[in-house]
Structure formats: structure tokens, C-alpha cells
Amino acid sequence: MKTKLRIVSLVASLLLLAGAAGAQDGIAWDDLTASQRTLLSEHESGWDQMDASRQEQIARGAERWLEMNQRQQAQAQERFQQWQNLGDDQRGMIRDRYELFRSLTPDARNRIQDTYRRFQRLPPDRRMELQRRFRDLTPDQLRRLRDTRLRPTDRPGGAAMGMGR
């Protein structure tokens, strides 16, 4: 149950990063569904003291969790475990990249997602070869690659920024 609670909290945190808007008055504990209250029972005693936006995030995370089938829940648990095993620097870099991704125009985000889907459809040996070649690029080669892939119009306001840290 603690792992599920951690996953719900992670999902809620990711919703915060995605700019999820919180309710102004918060959510009363009794307004949660019975399933949400069961899943979030460890939060009941402090629920009223939580910020309204945090309540909204946690409630949405619980709702998403409850809508997942067992396979999806297992995948979410695995991803959460991987997230927990990352160092603070790695998590910070992922958060920064996520914010950068969210700042791109919808067209730019769609292009990135399409490219990722095409990559996933490649045979495993071809994916491994491309990953090896990418890892072997010098910082200058990486910078040039990123500069050529990010169009000036990919950001609201039209200013392109490098994607590296």
C-alpha cells in the first residue's frame, strides 16, 4: 500500500509540473470517492491542512491510479522505483527537461513524440546501435544536433534555446 501511495504522490507531483490547476477551495475529504479515500487513507488526518492545489493533485493522481489496469499499475510501480533510485541531480535534470518540453509549441512536442514513436518501432538491434552512436557524440556534436533539430518557432515567442544543461 505504501508503494501505491508513493506512486499516487509521484503522479500528483508530475501533474504539478504539468501545470495542473488546483481548486481554489480545495476538496473536502468526504467529496472524494470511496475508492479514493481507501487509497489515500494515510492522508486523511492531514487532508484539511493540505494546500488546495495539493489536494487536487493527489485526488487526480488517485483517480488515474484507480483507472489503471493491473499491468499499467505494475508499470507505474516499476517507473516509480526507477525514479526513486535516481540521484537528486538526475531527477533535477529530468525535471528541467520536462519543463523545457512543456515550454515548446504543441507542434514541436508532437514532432518529438512522433520521432520517439518511430524510434520505439525500430528493431531492438537498430535502437541499440543508434543509442550507442548518440552516447559517443562529443558535447559539440550534441549541441549542433540539438540546434539543428529545434526550430526558432518551436517556443512560444519564437526564441529557440539549447536543450543541453
Image (cartoon, rainbow, N blue to C red):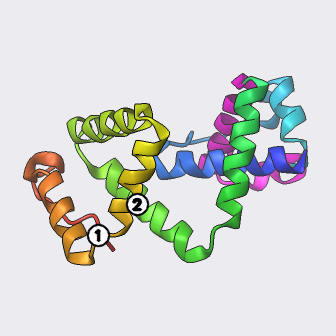
Identify which residue is drawn at 70% across, 30% down: 72
Q: Amino acid at mark 2?
A: Arg
Of the image marks 2 and 1, the number of the one nearer the N terminus: 2
What are the residue bounds of the magenta stretch?
43-68
Helix, strand or loop at label 2? It is: helix
Question: How many residues crowd mark 2 within 10 Å: few (<14), some (14–19), many (20+)?
Answer: few
Residue 137, horizontal then vertical, whole percent: 29, 69
Q: CA distance from mark 2 to mark 1?
A: 9 Å
The answer to whether 38 is drawn above or below residue 164 in the figure is above
Residue for badge 2: 132
- Residue 38: percent from the left, percent from the top? 90, 33
Q: Give the amino acid at mark 1.
A: Leu
Please state, as top left, top right, bottom left or bottom right, where the C terminus lies in the image.
bottom left
Is 113 covered by the magenta stretch? Answer: no
Give the numbered dot on residue 159: none
From the viewer's perspective, tell me whether residue 119 is left or right of residue 85: left
Which quarter of the rendered picture does the N terminus lie within?
top right
Q: Position of residue 67 (x, y in %)?
A: 70, 23
Would you say residue 27 is visible in this rendering?
Answer: no
Depth order, front residue of 137/80? 137
Q: Main secondary structure of the magenta part?
A: helix
Q: Is residue 50 left or right of residue 162?
A: right
Q: Position of residue 140 (x, y in %)?
A: 20, 76
Report the residue at 49% width, 42% height from top. 21
**Residue 64 colored in magenta in the image:** yes
- Is 92 or 20 nearer to us in this picture? 92
Q: Quadrant of residue 161?
A: bottom left
Inspect this view and state whether residue 48 appears.
Answer: yes
For disc 1, the marked residue is 137
